[in-house]
Image (spheres, rainbow, N blue to C red):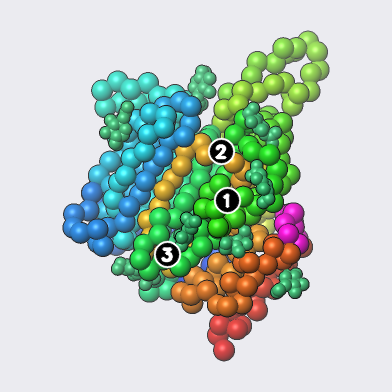
Amino acid sequence: MGSYLLSILAIGATLPCVVARQQFTFGTNWQAQFHSLSSPVNVASKGPPSGEDEDRIPIRIDNRCEDTIWPGIFTQAGTGPGTGGFELVPGNKTELWVSPDWQGRIWGRTNCTVDGDRASCDTGECGKLDCESSGVPPATLAEFTLAGGENNMQTFYDVSLVDGYNIPIAVNHIPSKNTSFIPPNLTNLACIATAGWLYESNATSTVYANTSYPVPWEMDESNDSVSSWCPWPYLKFPPAKPGHGVFPYPDDNIERPAFSPCNSACAASGKDKDCCAGKYNDPKVCKPSRYSKTAKDVCPDAYSFAYDDQQSTFIIPKGGGWEVVMCPKGRSTTILRQLGDVMFGLADSGELSDEALARLQNTTFINMEKGAGSGLTVELTWLVLTVLLVVSLSV
Ligand SMILES: *[C@@H]1O[C@H](CO)[C@@H](O)[C@H](O)[C@H]1NC(C)=O
Ligand SMILES: *[C@@H]1O[C@H](CO)[C@@H](O)[C@H](O)[C@H]1NC(C)=O
Ligand SMILES: *[C@@H]1O[C@H](CO)[C@@H](O)[C@H](O)[C@H]1NC(C)=O
Ligand SMILES: *[C@@H]1O[C@H](CO)[C@@H](O)[C@H](O)[C@H]1NC(C)=O
Ligand SMILES: *[C@@H]1O[C@H](CO)[C@@H](O)[C@H](O)[C@H]1NC(C)=O
Ligand SMILES: *[C@@H]1O[C@H](CO)[C@@H](O)[C@H](O)[C@H]1NC(C)=O
Ligand SMILES: *[C@@H]1O[C@H](CO)[C@@H](O)[C@H](O)[C@H]1NC(C)=O
Ligand SMILES: *[C@@H]1O[C@H](CO)[C@@H](O)[C@H](O)[C@H]1NC(C)=O
């Protein structure tokens, strides 16, 4: 039961379902905001929504894993797709529909044993085949607030490792008439931290977009490094230690299976310090743990802990639909570090300026920004950009 509670807290940590300009306010307490929003005002219904295509939003789930995946879908607000989960065989896709104000999360359950309407799974389990709650960590999450921000005109979305990581996930925008001007290389993110699923290192690639829209990629990881990023104590299924109790084998050198689910520090310890709760519920006090740092290295565009929002939330004008890919191959994207200010400008104004377009086409700029890494410099750069942006917007 404890883990259900944790995952509910984690949704709060990772769904910035509030006013647009507030994404520029660092250190907003998203958890508290979320809880105040999950009042009875936000009624969630199972769905699916009725009506014409303009009145509903497509959500596609695509299984590119070699194994069957049982997607889980949890609707927090709005009208859900009519299902909370089902079996998806390798290579298959399902198209679902939700209401334009839907808010919810999608994750992949692995190695489930289904018995009637019950399902018990290695990861992401919710108890039932058709989930009525969120899943037990660890699970990589794709989270959406389709109508958020000022006047509810923006879609907020993210991939979150706040609940841990089980499989690679990518999120692709499905353009609608009024969002087709947004280049897919600003919207389509991936988080891949599983050995065997990584392509050769390349600064950009068109794998998640089309041949004319290269997406910036993380450049530093290898199959080896992603097979050992999870701190040993957080492994959900730690391999047996050959020298257990006899030889002092360094745990990190023991080979791990490719699919090796990783609890987050918060999910593993439940401590205030790791969950940014209690006296740690303050961005100045709650610092990234070792888990969050390695998670951010392998998946720069994903949430790694509760106060990670300035480099983890995607925001674009609303209208389009979404595809969630389970086990994409490629590399993790690093869109927010490199192009985040362009994207936030777009979210705020609803259009791309000539300057923004020029920047998107300037590979010198993009290459200079790459590898900007984590840490203070980047945060300060962000802060400066942000302040400039806020100032320029308010005059
Ligand atoms: C693949 O998905 C389609 C559409 O959701 C479904 O009708 C079909 O039964 C699925 N195929 C398998 C083998 O499960
Ligand atoms: C499912 O379990 C098998 C056997 O333990 C394992 O090889 C496989 O990687 C697991 N699949 C996933 C997606 O975790
Ligand atoms: C990772 O392993 C896969 C499968 O063995 C291989 O195709 C790929 O090239 C490797 N990636 C890197 C970056 O070495
Ligand atoms: C890496 O980028 C180069 C230049 O854009 C491209 O020709 C090559 O196909 C890319 N390799 C991969 C593995 O995407
Ligand atoms: C790539 O995607 C953009 C935006 O969705 C579209 O306008 C363009 O026609 C596509 N290009 C190709 C070659 O498919
Ligand atoms: C795009 O069009 C949809 C459907 O007509 C509408 O609901 C939505 O508000 C529009 N988005 C924007 C940003 O104007
Ligand atoms: C995004 O796509 C545009 C249009 O093809 C391209 O000029 C630009 O370099 C791409 N941006 C990145 C970061 O790859
Ligand atoms: C591209 O970006 C670099 C680095 O910011 C800058 O020096 C250069 O002037 C830009 N080029 C264009 C054509 O804007």
Q: Is residue 144 left or right of residue 167?
A: left
In this orientation, which residue lies closer to the viewer: 217 or 164?
217
Horizontal and vertical percent position of residue 87 = 34, 30
Q: Which residue is mark 1?
A: 206
In percent of the image, x 61 and y 23: which residue is there? 257
Q: Is mark 3 within 8 Å of ligand 5?
A: yes
SS for dot 2: loop
Amino acid at the residue labelled 2: Lys
> Could you tell me how far apart the alpha carbons at marks 1 and 3 are, in whole angstroms?
17 Å
Q: Report whether residue 97 is seen.
A: yes
Horizontal and vertical percent position of residue 270 = 56, 40
Q: Quadrant of residue 235?
A: top right
Q: Is residue 59 magenta?
A: no
Does residue 74 sit above or below 226 in this rendering?
Answer: below
Amino acid at the residue labelled 3: Ser
In percent of the image, x 30 and y 46: which residue is there? 96
**Highlighted range, magenta:** 367-376
